[in-house]
Each structure stands twice: as C-alpha cells, then as structure tokens.
Image: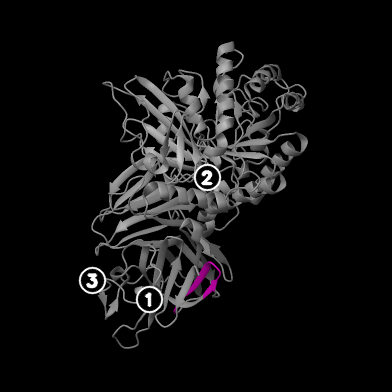
C-alpha cells in the first residue's frame, strides 16, 4: 500500500518503489491559561525506502534551540509540513492571508484526512476563521514521485485575501552541508546549470514577466555535494505552472533546509470569496539514491506517463523543416513551393511557414499580429494552394502563430483597445513593436479560440507553432475592483490553459509546438498540451550543448526541439563555423529539425542533409521513446556525452560532442549506464563486451586530439542475454 496511516501514533507514511516520505500530526498545548491545543504536521523523513512504518514513531532532533512561546514549540523548532504565516515563524510560509478584520495570523490545525488508493488528502482548518486547506499528496510508486498541491477553501461569510499561496513545503533531512542545483534562464541562454552551497541566506528561484522561466527554470535539486550522474542522494522537484513561479530554498537558524514553491507572490493577491476555492499548481517531487541520471530518468518517465498528450506520447517526433532563419519575412507562395519540393526530397515530414504570412507583415514591428489574415500579395489564393502542394509532396503543413500579441497598426488594436495590457495613465509599453493582449479577459480567450478555429477548420494545418516573443507588462485588469487587480497574472495562465486544452481536445491530430521567445515557457505543465518544446532561439551548436544538458534533467528528449538543429554553417548568434555532422548528430539527441536555404544549397549539401534525416529516422525510436543518461558534462569535462537505451534494451546509442580538443587529448573510457549486467553487447559491430564491462570498465571512444567540433555516434546492439 503506497499510503499508510498509523492511527495510534498519528503518522502518515507514503511509499514509492524505492523511497519513503513520512510525517506526523503532533499535538501540544502551550503552558499558559486558555491556550489552544495545536495539531500541526511535522516532517519525519524523506529518502531511501524504509519498509517498517513503526520506525518513524520516534522522531529525531525535534527539541533543538529555538523560539519559545509559553511552552509552545514554535514552527522554527521543527520541520513543518505546511506552515501558515503568523506566530513565531520567520521563514518562508506556505500560506499567508489577511482576514476581513485585518488579522494576518494563520493558525492551522489538523482536522481530518482521507486515503484513496495512492492519494492522501489532509484537511487543515484555522481555529477561529472560516478557512480550510486541503493538502493533496499523489504517490506515483513506479517513478518515486510524490505530487503535492493545496486547495484553499473559504468556509466563512467574508472574503479572505490570499497574499501568498504556495503549493507545498518539503523538508530535507538534517545534514552537515547541502548544495543546490538550479537552472538559470534568459533569452538565448536558457537552462544554465548552477551549483551553490545552501547557506542561511535564502535562495529564491523565481521567474516573472508572465512566463515560467524568464529568469530561472522552476526546478531544484539538493545533494550533499558528492552526488554525480551515477551515484549519490538527490532531493529534487519542479513546478507545473506556466506563469510566474517561485521556489524558496532556505536553511533556517536551526540548520533545517526546507523548500517552498508555487505561484510567485510578487505582485500577487487573490480575493477568495465565501464558498470559493483556490487550487494551487502541482509541485512534482522526487528522491534519487542513484545520482542525477536516476533522478532525470524518474522525472522524465513520470512526465511521459502522466502529462504528455496521448495522441503523440508513444510516437517519435516528426522531422520538421522551418525556413525562418533563412528567409525571415521574405516569403511568398512561389518561393515556398520551390523550397517544399526540395524539402520533401530530403525526407522532411512537416513543412512549416513561420512568421510573415499575415497581412502587411514585413518586420517584427509591422502589421499582422492580432488580425491573423493571410497576405494576398504573398499568397493570392490564400494558403490553400501551398498546403495542397505540401500534402502532394507527402509532407504535413505547419503554421506559426503568436496569438498573445498585437501590433499597433492592426484592426484589432483599433477595435478593442480595452483588450491591451495597458495602464491608462501610462504610455503604451511596446517591445519588438508588440503589445500584450490581456488573456485574463474571457472575451480575449474567446477571440483567440475563434482565430484558431478559423485557421484549423478552413485549412489542412497539421502543425501549430505557438510563439510568445515578449514578457507581460502593465498587467492591468479592466472591469474588476482594485483589490482584485493582482489576480490578472493567474487568470492569464488559466485562460491560456483553456485555449491549449481546446486545441488538443478539438484537434488531437495537430502536432503542437510550444515556443515562447525560444524556450521561456517550457515547464512540465506545458507538456500537457505540447508535442514539442522549442527550447531556445539560440541555434549555436556549442551553446546548445549547455542548454540541452540542463533541460534534460526534466524534459523527455523527444520534446526537445528548435535549438541544436541543422542550420547553415556560420549562422546563429555566435556565427560559429561548424560541420553539418556536428549539428545533425546534436539534433538527433532530441527532436530533429532543419532550417537551411535549400534553393541555394548544392546537390551535395542536400544529399548530406537527406542522409542525416534518414539516420535520424532510424535512431529516433531509441532516442525519443527509450531512456536517456548523461555520461559526461560540457560544464566540467572536455565534452558532452549522452547515452540512449531503447525501451526493449536491445539498442544503445552513445553520442559524443567535443567542441575543442587540445594537446592531443585522448578521451577517457566512457562508462555506460542502465544496461543488463549479464548480457553481451556488440560495439559498432567490431567487438563485444558485457553490460557489466561497459558500465564498469567502459568503452574506448577512439576520440583523440582532433581539433574543433569533434563528434561521434557509437552504436551498440544487445546480442545475447
């Protein structure tokens, strides 16, 4: 049983296949007249599996130095499972409220619980005011994942202001030193790995601007500093929310390390009216006793099993051609038909028309955004002739859209200025010549759904690339009271999910790619609706190695697209010269796409592209539907090395990328991961080794000091069990 309750001891024990999570209801009555008995939740353990639940009856290290309030043990003196703001607690609370009479103290007591299958709901209630909190715990045994969130309920007769409403707090077992792994993010430099010691200075992993990883991706991993790819204990988690997020990691005065996460409380407030509820996003949490590879494998497996759209999750991603980097806005029907004919010969499966297909759209700041009408100068008969030709050539047709944005010269701007994010006393705040549509308004949601339906019902469009190329600013909320203005950030995201859900329900056959200014909205909640993530606008192959290493901690490889594809040498932000083989193999470690001016390409270049596309199709089941492991790090080793094992274990692929080898450097043996120890494997058809040998002795990559942009694919087959 994954959830067990020891009634006599008031202890809850959550069990996964390899981990245990335990906490208790602790009862105490302060030693002063009229004191109320407190029944609070206290964390007992989170780590490697302990089968005997009775082992948690005797708590560890509760009575340490701390504040004392008339004999009451303060929240600072123990590892609180869910802590309301108030009392003698001075760390990050999970919930902070203001009641109608101005009181800002929350006194939550355990009230009841309910266990159903692999789910636990614990209800807390304030001892005086009409507020209850349901703590939800969902146990995913196979993946060592526990998903937590909370539901706040107003059971009183007056409104309550929620000033901070996080999904959960988790506590890391007491230790000497802990280190935090996080992913910094900004445009063209997403998912940068950072490793820092956790001190008593609070670390805040936060993203603002309306997207989930504008500054930091919503992910944390905590270890004692000795963990590597294959060994060590790691506590980790990620938030499933596509708007403003916050994860606070802190070590309090008593050396308790706790992590609290959810919707950012920056510019946030929610008016909770009587009989209404607020549901927080899910905080997906896990523990690995086998290093970062096991942590990533479990998190990716959970994402595949529970969050991906069902129509595509068991299929490899198609090969996508998108000529944006070549043509920008200089497109028309005749040119694209010529390009499509060549793209079909290379083996492309989806042909995408990116920005520039709308009326008067000749630059980032010119018309088109908001109206979404086909430019008849470029496409005299609409998109239908081009779509028909693309389909005749055996490819699906795809289209780029950016529905959250509007340009000033659009008809929509003139007709509905009240739909624009804008404070009336301020100038319009443009970025890239664009303004934000206020998606928090239901009429804007309806308008965008109408635009999508118009495109998909009248054209055979089988791929949508949804873009968002600027952050939200001047986040006003017309028509609502002043005390509800700050709800705009949450309602924006809620309505965005409604639109995404509409697309997936009504058009399940449409391949949906999420692209927010490259990859600034790539949290796992978007994977409920997305079939591919465009993870960066930066196509530089070396930069891509760094970004892929970070995002691979969370995202399954089949969903990692965009950056790191086949593009012209010398293109991209760094203008780096790079062999096509390097970019092609890098693209194959995710969802391969290409963006090359095929009309100007030589016959030899087109044949080379076709060869790599053919190879990608041969390998993609193993890469995208199997399991992936990090073998070396671009951050600290001389190369990036990644392994993929097919779902049946019969094929193993090792991709190696070394951007710069010096002084006749000889790359060391590569120790593989996740193999059958007793089986025999054929390495590139030249020799055999046991799984045990490949994992412990390793294989010789035969990579020496060969200069810059060295890459290699090693193919390994299981030949005997």
Distance CA(mark 2)–CA(mark 1):
59 Å
Q: Which residue lies furthest to the front in this view?
A: 720
The nearer-to-camera label among 3 and 1 is 1
Q: Of the residues under marks 3 and 1, which one precedes in the sequence?
A: 1
Q: Foreground residue, 136 or 406?
A: 136
As drawn, the label of residue 153 is none
Q: Of the residues under marks 3 and 2, which one precedes in the sequence?
A: 3
Q: Quadrant of residue 503?
A: top right
Here the colouring is one colour
Residue 101 at least partly seen: yes
Q: What element carries label 3?
A: loop
Residue 215 at least partly seen: no
375 is higher (above) or lower (below) than 672: above
Q: Residue at x 34, y 47 (%)?
A: 181
Left or right: 719, with 259 as reference point: right
Q: What stretch is highlighted in magenta?
A: 114-127
Q: Is the magenta stretch mostly helix, strand or loop?
A: strand
Residue 571, given in percent of the width and then of the height, sits at: 47, 20
Q: What element carries label 2?
A: loop
Q: Quadrant of residue 350?
A: top right
Q: Of the residues under marks 2 and 1, which one precedes in the sequence?
A: 1
Residue bearing mark 1: 54
212 is higher (above) or lower (below) than 9: above
Q: Residues within 10 Å of mark 1 (few under 14, many from 20)?
A: few
């Amino acid at each position: 049983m994954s959830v067990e309750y020891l009634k006599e001891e008031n202890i809850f024990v959550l069990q996964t296949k390899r981990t245990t999570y335990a906490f208790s209801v602790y009862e105490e009555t302060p030693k002063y007249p009229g004191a109320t008995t407190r029944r609070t939740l206290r964390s007992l353990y989170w780590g490697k599996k302990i089968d005997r639940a009775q082992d948690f009856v005797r708590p560890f290290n509760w009575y340490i130095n701390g504040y004392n309030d008339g004999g009451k043990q303060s929240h600072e003196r123990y590892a609180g499972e869910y802590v309301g703001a108030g009392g003698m607690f001075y760390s990050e609370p999970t919930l902070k409220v203001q009641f109608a009479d101005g009181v800002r103290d929350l006194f939550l007591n355990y009230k009841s619980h309910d266990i159903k299958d692999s789910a636990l709901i614990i209800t807390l209630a304030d001892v005086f005011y009409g507020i209850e909190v349901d703590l939800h715990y969902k146990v995913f045994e196979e993946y060592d994942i526990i998903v937590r969130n909370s539901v706040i309920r107003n059971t009183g007769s007056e409104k309550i202001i929620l000033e901070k409403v996080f999904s959960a707090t988790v506590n890391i077992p007491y230790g000497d030193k802990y280190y935090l792994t996080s992913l910094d993010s900004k445009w063209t430099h997403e998912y940068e790995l950072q490793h820092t010691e956790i001190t008593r200075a609070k670390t805040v992993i936060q993203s603002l601007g309306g997207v989930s990883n504008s500054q930091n991706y919503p992910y944390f991993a905590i270890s004692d500093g000795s963990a590597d790819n294959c060994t060590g204990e790691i506590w980790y988690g990620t938030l499933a929310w596509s708007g403003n997020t916050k994860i606070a990691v802190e070590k309090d005065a008593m050396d308790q390390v706790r992590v609290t996460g959810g919707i950012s409380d920056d510019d946030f407030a929610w008016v909770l009216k009587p009989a209404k509820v607020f549901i927080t996003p899910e905080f997906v949490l896990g523990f690995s006793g086998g290093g970062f590879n096991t942590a990533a494998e479990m998190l990716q497996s959970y994402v595949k099993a529970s969050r991906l759209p069902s129509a595509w999750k068991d299929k490899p991603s198609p090969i996508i051609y998108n000529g944006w980097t070549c043509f920008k806005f200089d497109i028309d029907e005749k040119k694209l038909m010529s390009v499509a004919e060549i793209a079909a010969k290379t083996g492309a499966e989806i042909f995408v028309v990116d920005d520039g297909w709308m009326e008067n759209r000749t630059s980032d700041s010119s018309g088109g955004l908001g109206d979404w009408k086909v430019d008849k100068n470029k496409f005299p008969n609409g998109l239908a002739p081009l779509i028909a030709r693309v389909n005749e050539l055996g490819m699906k047709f795809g289209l780029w859209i950016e529905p959250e944005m509007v340009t000033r010269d659009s008809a929509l701007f003139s007709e509905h200025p009240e739909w624009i994010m804008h404070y009336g006393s301020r100038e319009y705040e443009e970025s890239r010549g664009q303004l934000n549509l206020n998606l928090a308004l239901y009429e804007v949601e309806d308008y965008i759904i109408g635009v999508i339906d118009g495109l998909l019902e009248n054209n055979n469009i089988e791929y949508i690339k949804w873009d968002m190329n600027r952050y939200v600013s001047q986040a006003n909320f017309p028509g609502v009271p002043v005390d509800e203005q700050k709800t705009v950030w949450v309602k924006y995201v809620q309505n965005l999910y409604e639109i995404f859900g509409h697309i997936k329900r009504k058009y399940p056959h449409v391949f949906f790619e999420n692209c927010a200014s490259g990859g600034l909205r790539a949290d796992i909640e978007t994977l409920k609706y997305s079939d591919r993530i465009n993870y960066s606008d930066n196509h530089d192959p070396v930069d891509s190695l760094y970004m892929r290493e970070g995002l691979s901690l969370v995202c399954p490889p089949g969903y990692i697209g965009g950056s790191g594809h086949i593009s012209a040498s010398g293109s991209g932000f760094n203008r780096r010269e790079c062999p096509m083989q390097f970019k092609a193999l890098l693209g194959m470690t995710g969802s391969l796409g290409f963006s090359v001016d095929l009309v100007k390409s030589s016959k030899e270049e087109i044949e080379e592209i076709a060869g790599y596309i053919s190879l990608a199709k041969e390998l993609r089941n193993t890469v995208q539907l199997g399991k992936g492991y990090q073998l070396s790090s671009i951050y600290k080793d001389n190369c990036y090395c990644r392994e993929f094992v097919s779902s049946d274990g019969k094929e193993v692929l090792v991709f190696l990328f070394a951007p710069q080898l010096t002084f006749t450097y000889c790359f060391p043996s590569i120790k593989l991961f996740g193999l059958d120890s007793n089986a025999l494997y054929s390495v590139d058809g030249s020799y055999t080794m046991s799984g045990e040998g490949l994992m412990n002795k390793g294989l010789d990559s035969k990579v020496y000091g060969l200069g810059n942009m060295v890459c290699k694919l090693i193919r390994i087959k299981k030949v005997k069990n």
